[in-house]
Amino acid sequence: MRVFLAIALETQAHQKATALLETVRMGLGPQSKCFRWVKPENLHITLKFLGSVEEQKLQAIKDDMHQLVTQHRPFSLRLQGLDAFPNLKKPRVLYIPVLEPRMPILKLYRDIEAIINHHGFESDSKGYTPHLTLARSIESRDRDKICTLDHTQMNLQDTFVSGFSEIILFQSITYAEGPVYEPLDQFKLAPAF
């Protein structure tokens, strides 16, 4: 099964992220057809995509994750604006960046990487940029000619904050209409003292 670890937005932050997704999609006009947009119910911040994992290895990872979360406290993140991988001139992924504070999520990511490496997975060579994905480009031969991104007319200054108190292990199930993310397990961060 294909799985990943992520954190979900609180309700109010999720509503703001959904509104921003619609603002970007509408603001791009015809260019919005160059992207496959994330369904609002699938919005999340990915911590680690694991891909296909056999059940026995997955259980060992889950056991280690239950231990890991005892070392981390709930935290909040501020998100704002629009950015893209690799850049806004040739966007492959449109996202809302995490602005601050980045240390709690980066420490959590590093600790998850250590667990995942211990179970035989390789580290991500590109590093980790915490973000909330809005859309992925649709591949085509002429994509770079017709899918330029002009977001300068959009007002993307709204900031929103979301608290995070758990990590969710999702299974990604692919259908013709798009992926569905089914929660398999939850790992509650240690309560603050």
Image (cartoon, rainbow, N blue to C red):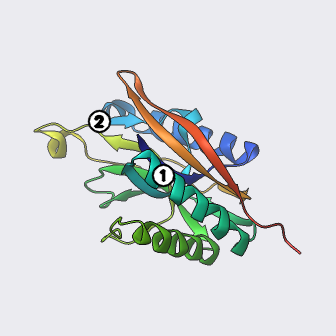
Mark 2 is surrounded, within 10 Å at the Cα level, by few (under 14), some (14 to 19) or many (20 or more) other residues, namely many
Does residue 10 lie above or below 125 as drawn? above
Q: Amino acid at mark 1?
A: Leu
The image quadrant where one finds the C terminus is bottom right
* Residue drawn at (34%, 68%) of the image: 124
Q: Residue reaching furthest right?
A: 193
Horizontal side, residue 122 vs residue 168: left or right: left
Q: Residue reaching furthest left?
A: 141
Does residue 24 lie above or below 178 as drawn? below
Mark 1 is surrounded, within 10 Å at the Cα level, by few (under 14), some (14 to 19) or many (20 or more) other residues, namely some
Does residue 102 lie above or below 43 as drawn? below
Horizontal and vertical percent position of residue 122: 32, 68
**Would you name the residue on which mark 2 appears?**
34
Which quadrant would residue 119 be assigned to in this image?
bottom left
The residues bearing labels 1 and 2 have C-alpha atoms spaced at a distance of: 35 Å
Which quadrant would residue 33 be assigned to in this image?
top left
* Residue drawn at (53%, 40%) of the image: 21
Horizontal and vertical percent position of residue 27: 45, 38
Mark 1 vs mark 2: give the one in front: 1
Horizontal and vertical percent position of residue 100: 62, 72
Q: Which sits in the foreground, 151 or 6? A: 6
Q: Is residue 90 visible?
A: yes
Horizontal and vertical percent position of residue 83: 43, 58
Per the rendering, the mark at residue 116 is none
**Would you name the residue on which mark 1 appears?**
58
- N-terminal of the pair, mark 1 or mark 2, is 2
* Residue drawn at (35%, 43%) of the image: 136
Q: Is residue 152 visible?
A: no
Horizontal side, residue 83 vs residue 100: left or right: left
Query: How many dots with numbers?
Result: 2
